[in-house]
Amino acid sequence: MSSGDAARFARHSPGDRWFVDETYVKVNGVWRYVYRAIDQDGQVIHALVSAHRDADATRRFFGRALATLKVTPSEVFTTRPRSIP
């Protein structure tokens, strides 16, 4: 059993309220965007690292999150970046 499998047994089923955010981090010396969804209990539901911040990356992120979990959130919350008034 791998460590990923061991962690999976401890996870509870994801909640229906998701908090979604994105950030910009350096990975191996290259800047990348990280998208992630967290449920109301603080469990990470899905994460995606992308070279681009665009509509295609966002669609890919949500498509994979919804397909993998087969859970449709009732609410999705985001935060507005401070750079946007």
Image (tube, rainbow, N blue to C red):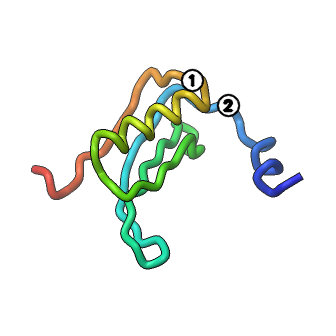
Looking at the image, which residue is at 42% across and 49% down? 35
| Depicted 13 relative to depicted 10: above or below | above
Task: Tell me the kind of residue under disc 2.
Answer: Ser
- Image mark count: 2
Residue in the foreground of this view, choosing between 33 and 85? 33
| Left or right of 4 on screen, residue 28 | left
The disc, 1 or 2, on the residue closer to the chain's N-terminal end is 2
According to the image, label 1 marks what residue? 71
| Mark 1 touches mark 2? (CB < 8 Å) | yes
Q: Position of residue 55 (x, y in %)?
A: 29, 40
Q: Residue furthest bottom?
A: 29
Residue in the foreground of this view, choosing between 19 and 55? 55
Task: Tell me the kind of residue under disc 1.
Answer: Val
Q: Position of residue 36 (x, y in %)?
A: 46, 47
* Alpha carbons under labels 1 and 2: distance apart: 9 Å
| Depicted 46 relative to depicted 70: above or below | below
Looking at the image, which residue is at 56% across and 28% down? 67
- Foreground disc of the pair 1, 2: 1
Q: Residue furthest right?
A: 1
According to the image, label 2 marks what residue? 13
Looking at the image, which residue is at 61% across and 30% down? 69
Toward which corner of the image does residue 79 lie, by quadrant? top left
Where disc 2 sits, the SS reads: loop
